[in-house]
Amino acid sequence: MHASIEATLGALAPTSPQPFSARVRLATRVAHQRLEDTAVMRDLMAPDLTPANYLSTLLLWERCWQPIEAELAAGLQRGMPAALMPARRLHFLQRDIAYLQTQCPQANVASPSTGANRLASAVASEHGWYGLAYVVQGSLLGGSLVRTRLMKSLGLVDHQGTEFFAGGIAPHALHLHWKSWLAQADQQLQRPTAIREAVEAADRTFAHMETVFSSACTTHE
């Protein structure tokens, strides 16, 4: 367990009235910021992003996202609540990649390595699935901003090449979906041990994404 997580959860005593939603936001703040500081995330928001750079970035997202969706599905099979299952987005991502490949036919495309075993270990606790789902569901909020920037910098229209970041949810409904998800998660996670396991898994999910994104330099010239 990361020292920062241990310190944060230690400061929030087991009898703390704070729900999971408040504790996980505070405890993963550092890991979340590290992810935002990666070259991949910076490039997505850059005004001079090129289609080729964007394609390279999407391929890293595919490498990151394949094990995430696999673990979400595995948790559902173990009895995790279907109401908290984030929307599947891998097919959107693969469709975006296919579209960008038509725009960049000369790009060197490599098959992604999933790193599935590493993520499976990170969320293997009884309630770790909730932490993984928290990161995935919350990513849609930032995804909406990313999509708006991509449409402007690359001139993309009609969701072409940006379906993954939209997630199939109308922008005006995102915050309502998020608030509903958090409320349901807080109801499911009442015991201190359950909250701790979910928070730790959320932190490790951010770390998984950071590791994948840091595995290749995608900063464009």
Image: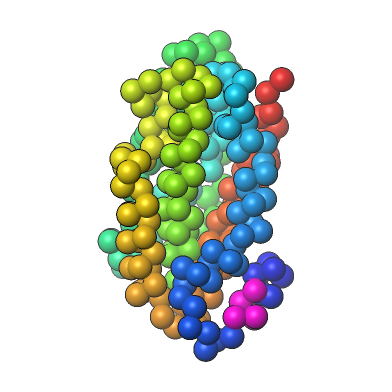
Residue reaching furthest to the bottom: 15
Is residue 9 in the magenta section? Answer: yes
Q: Which residues are magenta?
A: 8-12
Residue 73 appears left or right of 124: left
The chief SS type of the magenta part is: helix
Q: Position of residue 119 (x, y in %)?
A: 54, 55
Asked whether 108 or 100 is in front, the reply is 100
Residue reaching furthest to the front: 172
Q: From where the camera sits, is residue 71 visible?
A: no
Look at the picture and state if 186 lies above or below 47. below
Q: Position of residue 168 (x, y in %)?
A: 31, 39
Residue 183 position by quadrant: bottom left
Look at the picture and state if 63 lies above or below 68. above
Asked whether 70 or 36 is in front, the reply is 36
Q: Residue at x 32, y 43 (%)?
A: 172
Q: Residue at x 53, y 43 (%)?
A: 64
Q: Residue at x 55, y 10 (%)?
A: 106
Q: From where the camera sits, is residue 196 visible?
A: yes
